[in-house]
Structure formats: structure tokens, C-alpha cells
Amino acid sequence: MCYGDPDKLLQLVIGKRALPKNDLGHTPLDDFEHFCATTGCNEAELGSRAFAFVRLAYVTAGLSRREYKSAGLDLELQNACADIGMLLRPPARHDRRHLARRGAVLGRGKTPRRKPVR
């Protein structure tokens, strides 16, 4: 997978199939465009990479909503969205505690000392 490239990830999610539509006849990309027009979210202010990640998150979250599932979301697309959704969510509480103990949270804390090799 191409985790560092949000445009390639979005293309992987969409693939060659048409995106499902909700009850109003809108795809998640249509809804994203409306979201941007309503909120003022734009590529010029965010930068192209950040904007691409926002679009990826919005579309994959939209595909996970019930209204799109009822519109014919196939199993392959559901699985791709679940994989990307897993990458976009914050770490679980126990993961953060583990990272904090290891001194890896935002570079703060003490780094555990390694025992010398004999």
C-alpha cells in the first residue's frame, strides 16, 4: 500500500468502480465538494498534501456511513475503507501508555537505557 500518498490511497479505495450514491444521489466526493464550499476548506490555504489527506479521510469516512452502505457498497470497497480508517484513527489508549513508557510520545520523556552487550 502507498500510505504516504493520499491521492494514490483514494484511487485505491475508488478503483475502477463508480462510487455509491446516497439517498440524495450524491457520492462522497460530491459531499466533500459541498463540505469545502460550505466551510471554506480549500487547497490553497491547507496545501496540496494536507488537502489530499482531508479529502481521503472525508471520503473513506463517508463510505463507512450507513447511508452509502445501503446504496450498494461492495465488500472489496468496505474492506479498503476499513483498512484506511484504521490508519487514520488515533492510537488506542493502551498503545499511548505503552509509547509513553518507552519515551516515544512526541519525543518527550526519558528514553529507556539499553543494557550493554557483553
Image (cartoon, rainbow, N blue to C red):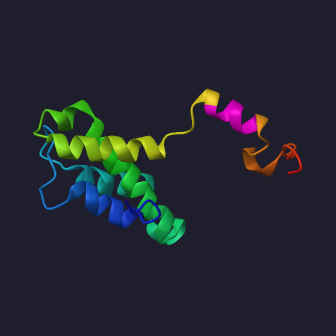
Residue 1 shows in the view: yes
For residue 58, side relative to residue 115 (left or right) = left
Vertical placement of 98 versus 13: above or below?
above
Q: Is residue 118 magenta?
A: no
Work out whether residue 15 or residue 43 is closer to the camera in this orientation and state it: 15
Q: Is residue 99 magenta?
A: yes
- Image x and y of residue 33, in percent: 31, 57
- Please identify the dominant SS of the magenta region: helix
Q: Residue at x 18, y 35 (%)?
A: 69
Q: Where is residue 108? Give x, y as percent.
A: 82, 46
**Residue lying furthest top:** 94
**85 or 28: which is nearer to us?**
85
The residue under the point 23% across, 30% down is: 66
Residue, x 37% and y 55% (percent of image)? 56
Residue 75 image offset from top left, x and y in percent:
17, 40
What segment carries the magenta color? 95-100
Residue 105 location, quadrant: top right
Numbered-mark total = 0
* Looking at the image, residue 104 lies above or below residue 6: above
Q: Residue at x 26, y 42 (%)?
A: 79
| Front position in the image: 118 or 42 | 118
Decide if residue 6 is on the left or right side of residue 78: right
